[in-house]
Amino acid sequence: MNRKPLPIFFTFLFWFLLFFQIQDIQAEKLSDVADLIGDQDAVLVADQQGRILLSKNADKKLIPASTLKILTSLVAIHYLGPDYRFATEFYLDNDSNLKIKGYGDPLLTSEILEEISKALVSRLDAEHKKIKDIVLDDSYFKQPIIIPGITSSSQPYDAPNGALCANFNTVYFRRLENGKYVSAEEQTPLLPFALRKVRESKLTMGRIVFSHKKNENTLYFGHLLKYFLEKEGVESNGDIRLGRVNKENDRLLFKYISIFSIKEIISKLIEHSNNFMANQLLISAGTKLYRPPGTLDKGVLAALNYTKNVLNIDNISIIEGSGISRQNRSSANSLHKILEKFEPYYELMHKSGREFYKTGTLDGISTRVGYIRNERGGLYRFVVLINTQGKSAESIMNRLLKVIK
C-alpha cells in the first residue's frame, strides 16, 4: 500500500521533464529567429499561458504601422461597446428642408443610402415629396480633422474624416475607350459633383478622394443622397449646403441605426486595413468619453487613457488611430499586452492556415502581429516589428510557423 505512490511520482517526473525538454528544444529553434532581428527590429513570442518564449529588443519603441489598428479596435470596443451601432438622423424643418445629422458612421455606403432613401420616401407625406434644400449637419465632429501622416493625395488611405461621410469619401472610376468617364462600381453613380475631380486626375482608372477643402467630404454625402432620393421619386429643387439641425423645431423623420455592430465594423477594418474607418472609430470613442465635438486629440486621449488604466502600458506613443503616422511608436511588449486583451476577438483577424494576423506596411517598415494556433488548439501570440529598410516580417513568420506546431 505504501509503495504505490513511487511509480506515480516517477511517471509525473518523466512527463514534467519531457515538457521542459520540449520547451528547451523549441526555445533553441526560436533562437534562430532572433538572429534575423536587427537593431531597428523586434520580436516577441509567447505561449498560450503568456510565458515569453522569444524576446529580442522587446522594450524598444518602434513604428507599428497598421498593427496599431488592433489597439484602436480595443479602444472602440471599450468605450463604445462591442454591440454599439452608429446612428444617422433625418429631419424635416418648417420650410421643407431635409436635414441630416451625422454621428461618425464609417459605413454609410451607396447601398445603405439607397435603403435609407426608400425608408425616407415611406415617411414623407404627399405634400413633402418635393423638398427644398438638403442641409448637412456634420457638427458632431469638429472640422477639419487633420490626421498626421495623411496627405492630399488621391489615394483612399488619405481620405479625410468627418461626422457625415459617404463611401469613405472616395469615388472609384474608369474611362471608356470613347473617353467617357463612368463609375467602376455598379452601385455608385458618377455624379457631376465628382466628375470635375475625376477629369483633373487624368487617370484612366482609379479613385479620387473628397477633401476638407470647401467641405467636399460632407457635401458629397448630400449629392449622393439627392441622387437616390430622386431615384425614388422625391424632387429636390434647392441647394445642398451645410447647416445645423434644430431638434426643438425640426421634425425627426427617420433615425437610421447601422446594420453593422462595432465588432462587425472592426472585422471590415482589419480585413481592408482602412485608415478612414480606424480614425472614425478612434474619434468616436474620444467623443463618447470627452463629449462632442469629436476631435483627433480627444480620440488620442481616450486611447492613452485606455492603454494606461486598462492595459497598464506607459511605453507607447499614439498620434492617430490607423498607424499611417510614422510618429506612432510601440514596443513589442506593449503590442503583446494588446494582443492578450484582443484574444477574445482573434477570429476577426485575417486567417491563413493556423495564423490569425494583422500586417503593417510603410516605406521601410514591415510589421506583423497576431496568433498561431498549435495542433492542440492553443494560441501562441507573436509580435514582429521590422523597421530596417529592405527587410520583411514575412521571412521571420515563415520560421515561426515551422517551429510552433
Image: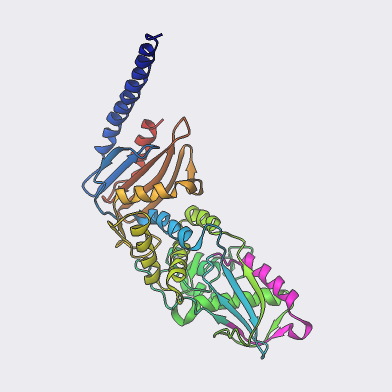
The structure residue drawn at horizontal position 64% and vertical position 72%, both measured from the top left corner, is: 255
Report the residue that reaches farthest toward the bottom: 95
User: Which quarter of the picture shows residue 38?
Assistant: top left
Expressed as whole percent of the image width and height from the top left, the position of residue 251 reads 66, 83
Q: How is the image coloured?
A: rainbow
77, above or below 373, in the image: below
Which of 9/326 is in front?
9
Residue 187 in percent (x, y) is at 64, 64
Of 127 and 246, which appears nearest the observer? 246
Figure quadrant of the C terminus: top left
The number of discs equals 0
Which portion, as a residue range, is magenta? Answer: 107-135
Residue 192 visible to the viewer: no
Q: Which is more toward the observer, 84 or 150?
A: 84
> x, y (%) of residue 9?
35, 16
Q: Is residue 277 above or below residue 60?
A: below
Does residue 75 show up? yes
Residue at image position (40%, 61%) is: 322
Queried whether the magenta region covers residue 81, the answer comes back as no
Is 119 a magenta residue? yes
Is 325 placed above or below 1 here?
Answer: below
Q: Is residue 140 above or below residue 69?
A: below
Q: Nearest the camera: 90 or 273?
A: 90
Q: Which residue is most to the right?
A: 126
For this view, does 331 lie left or right of residue 15? left
Left or right for 315, reference 370: left
Percent coordinates x, y for residue 206 in the rendering:
50, 64
Q: Residue furthest front?
A: 1
Q: Quadrant of the N terminus?
A: top left
Quadrant in which residue 85 is drawn: bottom right
